[in-house]
């Protein structure tokens, strides 16, 4: 991180602390409730997008890595997840190209015309 950016963050701590202390209790309590709900919302979003048969192993692998491997933060798990997503994307793209080629071969062989010499 550049030095000027870290000094901006360090300089903003005081005003942010004053802002948080100036908030009414009901607003602060609302933020606490919303913060407690966020993990459930995140888990729901993950299940909505990943609860397909071919993605369940990745979901289980990610949660296992996040729960049992002791990291200082979850960035390594996110990087591993992104790498696996790129691998899956490349594999799906490769498979769709193969399917297109096979389909074009089947269509050209089903004609029975004179172009194949028979």
Image (spheres, rainbow, N blue to C red):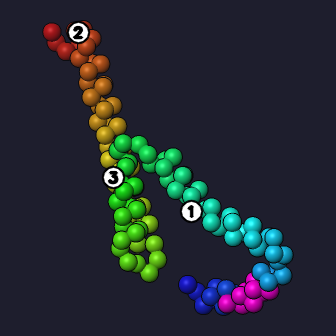
- Which residue is identified by label 2? 112
Q: Quadrant of residue 80?
A: bottom left
Magenta region: 10-18
Q: Alpha-carbon distance for marks 3 and 1? A: 21 Å
- Which residue is identified by label 3? 57
Q: Residue at x 62, y 66 (%)?
A: 36
Camera-nearest residue between 65 and 112: 65
Q: Quadrant of the C terminus?
A: top left
Is residue 20 toward the left or the right of residue 41 in the image? right
**Element on which disc 3 rests:** helix
Is residue 108 toward the left or the right of residue 38 in the image? left
| Image position of 3 with respect to 84: above or below | below
Give how far across and how far down residue 70 sits, in percent: 38, 78
Give how far across and how far down residue 17 sits, in percent: 75, 86
Q: Alpha-carbon distance for marks 2 and 1? A: 60 Å
| Image position of 55 with respect to 108: above or below | below
Q: Residue at x 55, y 84 (%)?
A: 1
In front: label 2 or label 1 = 1
Mark before the other along the chain sequence, 3 or 1: 1
Mark before the other along the chain sequence, 2 or 1: 1
Q: How many marks?
A: 3
Residue 114 lies in magenta, yes or no? no
Q: Residue at x 75, y 71 (%)?
A: 29
Rate crowding at label 2 as few (under 14), some (14 to 19) or many (20 or more) other CA atoms within 10 Å: few
Q: Is residue 90 visible?
A: no
Camera-nearest residue between 19 and 10: 19
| Image position of 3 with respect to 82: above or below | below
**Element on which disc 1 rests:** helix
Rate crowding at label 3 as few (under 14), some (14 to 19) or many (20 or more) other CA atoms within 10 Å: few
In front: label 3 or label 1 = 1
- Which residue is identified by label 1? 39
Q: Quadrant of residue 74?
A: bottom left
């Amino acid at each position: 991180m550049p030095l000027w950016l870290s000094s901006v963050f360090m300089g903003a701590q005081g005003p942010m602390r004053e802002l948080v202390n100036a908030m009414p209790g009901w607003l602060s309590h609302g933020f606490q409730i919303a913060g407690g709900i966020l993990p459930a919302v995140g888990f729901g979003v993950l299940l909505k997008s990943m609860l397909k048969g071919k993605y369940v192993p990745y979901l289980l692998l990610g949660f296992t890595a996040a729960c049992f491997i002791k990291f200082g933060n979850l960035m390594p798990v996110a990087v591993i997840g992104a790498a696996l997503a790129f691998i899956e994307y490349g594999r799906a793209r490769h498979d769709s190209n193969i399917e297109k080629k096979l389909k074009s071969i089947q269509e050209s062989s089903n004609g029975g015309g004179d172009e194949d010499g028979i």
